[in-house]
Image (spheres, grey):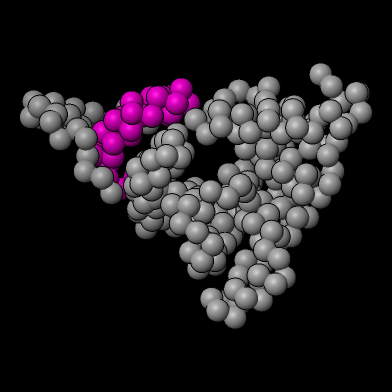
Amino acid sequence: MNSAAHQFRSFRLWLYPLLTFSLVALIASVIPEPRAKELAKTGIDLADKEMRRMNYPKADSLYTSELRKNPGNAELCWKLARLEVSMGESISSKNADAALQHYRKAAEYARTSISLDSTSSKGHTWLAASLGIMADKIGTKEKINRANEIKRELDSALRHNPNDETALSLLGSYYREAANIGWFNRVLATTFIGNVPKGNYDQAEKAFRKAISLAPKIIRNYHELALICIDKGNMEEALQLMKIAVEKPVLFASDKRRIEQMRALLKKYSSAQPSTLSP
């Protein structure tokens, strides 16, 4: 993953009129439990829809409203963690402190989700994501210090769901980061800090290829795999992967930044490749 910290706010809906609260309580008391659960799921679905639209403030409002009514819902907590990560990544790199606050909130939500349901892969996945990006922003020493916890969370996520495409993508990034630690730096880190991440490009590549097979629309996976191909000198496949990626739909705010980076790489490297690779 390109080097560049995924970071509990007060609820924004505290001004809801007392009448609204009373109405919700009344509805909950008269609607049979299955129907009440159906309505709750509908509320989450609406929030998911706004999340897909990248309307993060609206998704935040809807998820938070549902959490007020269902504080023990592990799914809501990990989805809020995912949202906080996405919100953080949408912020300009010039405002790192604001982004960090979102990543810290993401970690809090993810830990709450795990405490409510430790068997759900997504809580572990988004905890790893938030810890990873916070370590990435903070620096090398913190990254190494947190590496073992991140790996434990990813292992837990994939133990509960071997096909968690997000966990696989993050695992690929973990292995790539580990592969980028040279032997000399590894010796130094082991001497002064402790155990450092272990992994190689082959492991990273395997994780990203499986993630692509499970979620072929996710731009991140193509971009990260292309970077591995560049590192390994496989420029032809790197260019092919990036050309596929830039035609994929933008699903997260961070995708826009990745597309810009890939377009720059395509411009840089395409002229050195056979003309058959041109669009």
* Residue 153 location (% of width, % of height): 52, 59
- On the image, the x and y values in percent for residue 20 come to 13, 26
Across and down, in percent, residue 207 comes to 70, 49
Q: Nearer the viewer, residue 158 or 3?
A: 3
Whether residue 51 appears in magenta in the rendering, the answer is yes
**Residue extent of the magenta highlight:** 46-73
**Magenta span: chief secondary structure:** helix
Q: Classify residue 238 as left or right of residue 41.
A: right
Q: Is residue 128 above or below residue 271?
A: below
Q: What residue is shown at x 38% (from left), y 56% (from top)?
A: 111
Q: Nearer the viewer, residue 112 or 232?
A: 232
Magenta-drawn stretch contains 122: no
Q: Is 15 rendered above or below residue 197?
A: above
Residue 97, placed above or below residue 156: above
In the image, 6: left or right of 3? left
12 or 124: nearer the viewer: 12
- Residue at image x 61%, y 47%? 2
Whether residue 172 is visible: yes
| Above/below status of 187 relative to 7 | below
Residue visible at 21% across and 43% down?
A: 10
Residue drawn at x 33%, y 33% as measured from the top left: 60
Relative placement, left or right, of 231 versus 102 is right
